[in-house]
Amino acid sequence: MPTVVVAPDSFKGSASAADAAAAIAEGWRSVRPTDSISLIPQADGGEGTIDAMVRALADAGAGARTHDVAAHGPDGRPVIARWLELPDGLAVVEFAESSGLPLMASLDSLGATSFGVGEVIRAALAHGARSFVVGLGGSASTDAGAGALSALGLRLLDAAGDELPRGGGALERLDSVDTSGLVARPTGGMRILTDVDNPLLGPRGAARVFAAQKGADAAAIDRLERGLARLAQVLGGSPATAGMGAAGGTAYGFATLWGAHIESGSAAIAELTGLATAASVADVLILGEGRFDETSMRGKVVGNALELAGPATRVIVVAGRIAAVPTLPDGRRAESVALTDLAGGADAAQADALHWLREAGAAAARGEASGG
C-alpha cells in the first residue's frame, strides 16, 4: 500500500497548515482511497506553530496537551495564550499567541511589549517544564525581549534607579539591569526557532527592517535602534550574530541572559513533528505554501522539506502560485500544482482555498501535476 505524507505550511490568509493538509488529503483520497495517508502540517516557528504540532502529534499518538494562560498582550490588554506540554518536560511556546501583532488594538511601535511571552514561560515553568522551544514570529514589539525577561524577574533601571516602562521606546533611557530576581534558566535549555537571519542592530537589524510594519515612522525607528543599542551595551553578548533580530530582538535577549540557542524554525518543526523521518521513507511527499518562489528554497518550510525526501520519493509541491521550479538536492525536479491554474486566477483561488486545495490533491493523485 503506497504511503503518502501531506506536510504543507499554512496558506497565509487562506488556510491554516492543518486545514490545508486535510483538504489536500481529502482530494487525494477521492482518487486513491486505499493509500495510507499521514498528515503532518508544518510551520516555521511563527504563527501556527502550536496548531501544527498539536495536529501532527495527535495523529502520531504522542501524548501532548495545551494549557491556557491569562497574560498581558502586547498593548497591555488581557489575552489568553497557550503553551504545549510534551511528556518529557518540553514546553512549546508561540510568541504570536501572547505578543503577536494582530493582538494590538492599534499599532504602537514604541509601547508594544513582549511581556506576555514571559508570563507564559513563567506559567510553564511553574507547571514543571524543564526545557523550552519558543517559536518567534509575528511580533508587535521591538524591545529585544526585555518585556518577556522582566516578566521573569529582570529589572531594567534608569539613571535614577527607577524601573523603565514597558516597550522598546523606553530602552534608550536604560542605565543598568538588576538580574538578582531573574528566574533561573530551565535545566534543559531553550531553543529559539526563527527563519530570519537578521542581527539585532544596524541596517539589517530588528528596528530598521521590521519596525515599520509595526507602525514605526522614521523617528520611531531611530529611537528603537538607539534603545536596542543601549540594551546591547548593558547586556553584552553577541548582537551581531545571525538571528538575534528575530521578534523585535527577543532572540538576542533570551540568548544573552538565558543562553538560548537560535536555530532554523522549519528544520526544528520538521524534527519535532516527525516529518524528518516520515519524508525519507514515504512513497509520496506533498508539500505546500501560499506562493512557491526562489525564497522558498532558502530555509523556508517547503525548501527545508524538499531536502528531507527520500531518493525514491515522489515529491509534489502545491502552492497558490508556482513562481520557481521546485528542485530537490539531488537535482530532481519536484512535481507541482498551482491553485491559480486550477481556479483560473488568484482571486478565485483565494476565495475558496480549501476547495481548490482538495482539487489539487485530486489532480496530484491522478498524476496531473506538472514537472517531475
Image (cartoon, helix red, strand yellow):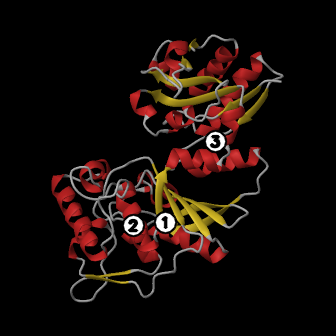
Q: Nearer the viewer, mark 2 or mark 1?
A: 2
The residue identified by callout 3 is 276
Report which quarter residue 15 is drawn in: top right
Figure check: 9 above or below 197: above
What residue type is disc 2 on? Answer: Gly
**Where residue 253 appears, x then y in whole percent?**
38, 68
Q: Image quadrant for the C terminus?
A: top right
CA distance for labels 3 and 1: 28 Å
Q: Which comes before the other along the chain, label 2 or label 1?
A: 1
Figure check: 364 above or below 183: above
Q: Which comes before the other along the chain, label 3 or label 2?
A: 2
Report which quarter residue 148 is drawn in: bottom left
Side of 219 where 266 appears, left or right: right
Residue at image location 41% in from the left, 53% down from the top: 101
Residue at image location 51% in from the left, 71% down from the top: 119
Residue at image location 54% in from the left, 20% down from the top: 332
Q: Is residue 44 visible?
A: no
What residue type is disc 1 on? Answer: Val
Q: Are marks 2 and 1 in contact (CB under 8 Å)?
A: yes
Q: Nearer the viewer, mark 3 or mark 1?
A: 3
CA distance for labels 3 and 2: 30 Å
The residue identified by callout 1 is 117
Q: Are marks 3 and 2 in contact (CB under 8 Å)?
A: no
**Where residue 331 appears, x then y in whole percent?**
51, 22
Q: Is residue 286 visible?
A: yes
Neighbour class for label 1 at 10 Å: few (<14), some, many (≥20)?
many
